[in-house]
């Protein structure tokens, strides 16, 4: 068990266990008590698995990885009477074959499956890597068409809300700003519920609400993540980001305007912060100031120096010397 910046994480793994203990541990601890399923590996001698469970009020996510073939059965006797959650399982490997409520589906990589926890189910795979996002059914009912009938339904990987959901959850697990604010946690969880509802098929009113709330937040996060990962690109602009995200440049400008900022000011701030970290890091002590500026995405050294001093109240050289001191 580990306490991290947001929510609580519990990690499970068989890799440090002797071979004879791996399957019994996984069956009893992770199978019966976490996912409430019988785990039947095809080859017990070669079995290995890892799992992580992340919990917030009104939201749980678990990630699982299996090294070999197995079958997971969720019989009626393992179903908790007070578990009315619905899950969206996202198959990250494209190997899962799932059956529930008379439906059978083998989603493509990145595709999703709707799972009702109150119903028996079966899952078979040669290897597996997936994440499952779980929420109370009642949280999605006001926004989703016939959510109770979604058991075993396939959600195509090309569904925008499904991709946004995966990226947004990944960002939330790393966002330190949520740690000290229950209000932000509540808002973030509602965003996840919005994206789940859209992926499953929201009503007209639900779609309107989700587009103005959860989708907007997830898109802003996706844009900012893309910018941070591509700061060094000399062609980084609102048009390149719009093309990568499948959005219009005007829409991106509008998203930043609603936050009281601009796209260009965000990019500049991220580049300056990146350069600042590099200047203070011993790892880059041998790099010249100009090399660091170019690595952070600045094409003009004088512009970098002026912007840096304006932002941090000191020159790059002064920050480097202070860091080394």
Image (spheres, helix red, strand yellow):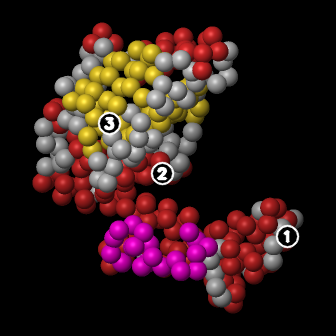
Q: Which residues are magenta?
A: 230-249
Q: Give the residue at mark 2.
A: 171
Coordinates of residue 34 in the picture (x, y in percent):
44, 21
**Is 245 within the magenta?**
yes
Position of the N terminus by quadrant: top right
Q: Earlier in the sequence, mark 3 or mark 2?
A: 3
Q: Give the residue at mark 1.
A: 286
Q: Residue at x 36, y 25 (%)?
A: 123
The numbered mark at residue 214 is: none
Position of the C terminus by quadrant: bottom right
Coordinates of residue 61 in the picture (x, y in percent):
42, 36
Separation of disc 1 and disc 3 at Cα?
52 Å
- Identify the secondary structure beneath mark 3: loop
Is the residue 272 above or below the residue 126 in the image?
below
Q: Earlier in the sequence, mark 1 or mark 2?
A: 2
Q: Give the residue at mark 3.
A: 106
């Amino acid at each position: 068990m580990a306490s991290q910046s947001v929510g609580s994480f519990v990690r499970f793994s068989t890799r440090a266990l002797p071979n004879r203990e791996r399957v019994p541990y996984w069956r009893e601890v992770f199978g019966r008590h976490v996912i409430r399923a019988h785990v039947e590996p095809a080859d017990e001698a070669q079995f290995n698995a890892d799992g992580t469970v992340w919990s917030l009020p009104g939201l749980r996510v678990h990630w699982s990885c299996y090294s070999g073939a197995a079958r997971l059965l969720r019989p009626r006797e393992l179903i908790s009477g007070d578990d009315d959650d619905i899950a969206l399982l996202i198959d990250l490997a494209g190997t899962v074959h799932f059956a529930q409520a008379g439906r059978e589906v083998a989603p493509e990589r990145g595709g999703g499956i709707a799972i009702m926890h109150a119903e028996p189910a079966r899952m078979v795979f040669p290897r597996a890597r997936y994440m499952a996002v779980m929420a109370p059914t009642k949280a999605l009912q006001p926004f989703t068409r016939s959510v109770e009938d979604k058991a075993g339904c396939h959600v195509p990987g090309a569904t925008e809300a499904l991709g946004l959901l995966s990226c947004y959850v990944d960002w939330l697990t790393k966002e330190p700003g949520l740690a000290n604010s229950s209000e932000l946690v509540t808002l973030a969880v509602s965003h996840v519920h919005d994206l789940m509802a859209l992926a499953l098929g929201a009503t007209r009113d639900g779609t309107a609400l989700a587009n103005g709330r959860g989708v907007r937040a997830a898109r802003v996060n996706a844009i900012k993540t893309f910018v941070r990962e591509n700061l060094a690109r000399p062609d980084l602009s609102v048009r390149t980001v719009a093309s990568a995200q499948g959005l219009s440049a005007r829409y991106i400008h509008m998203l930043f305007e609603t936050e009281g900022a601009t796209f260009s000011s965000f990019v500049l701030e991220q580049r300056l912060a990146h350069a600042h970290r590099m200047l203070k890091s011993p790892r880059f002590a041998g790099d010249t100031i100009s090399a660091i500026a170019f690595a952070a995405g600045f094409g003009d050294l004088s512009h970098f120096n002026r912007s840096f001093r304006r932002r941090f109240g000191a020159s790059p050289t002064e920050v480097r010397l202070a860091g080394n001191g």
